[in-house]
Image: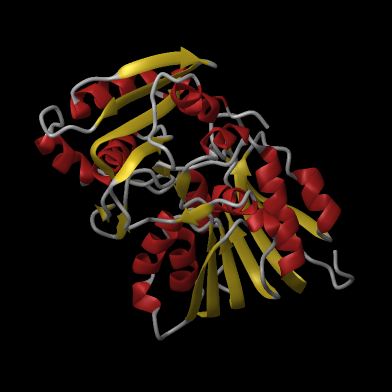
Amino acid sequence: MSDPALETLILPISSGDVELPEAARLLMLRARAGRPLNELSGHSLLCEQSFAPDRDALQKAGYKVEAETEEKDFDAVLVLPGRQRQEARALLARAASKAKTGGLVIACAPNTEGAKTLEQDFASLLGSADKLSKNKCRVVWGQVEPDTLDAALLKDWQELDAPRPVLDGAYLSRPGVFAWDRIDPASKLLADHLPETLSGRGADLGSGFGFLSRTVLEKALKVAAMDLYEAEKRALDLAEENLSAFKGKKIMSGLWSDVTKGIEGPYDFLVSNPPFHQSGKADRADVGQGFIRAAAQGLRSGGVFYLVANRHLPYERTLGDVFDRVEMLADEGGYKVIKATKGKGGK
């Protein structure tokens, strides 16, 4: 699968517009696997990635991956920032702090996902920005020099995505996490339709910062254990804090993993608001379909799966293929809540 942003990020190196020292130490923030990384094969590359599917792909390709590295003084730091501006600025500041004096920072974004803003922010922080445009993306780069680096801005931006209280202090969250400063309306609709009779061992597939899991534990007192599956480690760490009141009272585990590759079990019940974006803005029904199949495999016979999704997403056929009984519990506000039951014959 092509990755225009990754290809464009590497372009200044492959074209010779920037020169790296021999066997340079490189760090890539929000790294993704792909053929363009072959251009860096003569160097030492460390990938920082807290999103499990991208982590898994990088590790499979043979790259060293850390969720958050303590290393610094890199010859160059490459960045693929996300769309959320506070997180993107914090990532630029992190890149500048990880590069050695005189080292390079190289960043790239698609034109439709803030490329112009990225260039402006880059120049504000580092003092200047060279640029190239290709593949409907823009790559910018510059050196980290004390005379041109805005030290005050660096300090401010380093704190932009720090964890903080949200929702009147009810939860801890941070920019960049899904629906970071609000309760997603789909999750709220699902929470309203979860019964108090849930019991036994359950799991939240795609837990985010822990809203649904906490709702289950507060609402259904007979739940004995709850596993939280989340691909984004930054969100999973927050969920652990947001469920701290239940430590020692309930059996809980956080699993930093890609749900579409399967879950543990068997579970008595599952709840989920599956993601339908990975990177980019396009809807990805296959991700939710992967969640549904994983749920069916992870439930015991007679177990139930409570799912919320955007109304237009085509999940009913997949649900019908792997579950014995499928019921629509709600259809409002553009979202649908579905209860699926696993039959005693395994479906």
The furthest residue to the right? 345
Q: Quadrant of the N terminus?
A: top right
Where residue 193 appears, as percent x and y from the top left, is 56, 57
**Residue 32 spot, x, y in % from top left:** 54, 41
Which residue is located at x 72 percent, y 59 percent? 294
Given residues 9 and 244, the one toward you in this image is 9
Q: Nearer the viewer, residue 12 or 278?
A: 12
Decide if residue 198 is in sight here: no
Which corner quadrant of the image does residue 267 belong to?
bottom right
Specify the quadrant that holds the C terminus.
Answer: bottom right
Question: Residue 222 at x, y = what percent?
Answer: 54, 81
Q: Is residue 321 left or right of residue 154?
A: right
Q: Residue at x 21, y 28 (%)?
A: 126
Q: So how many labels did they put on this image?
A: 0
Query: In the image, 264: left or right of 323?
Result: left
Mark yes or no: residue 222 visible: yes
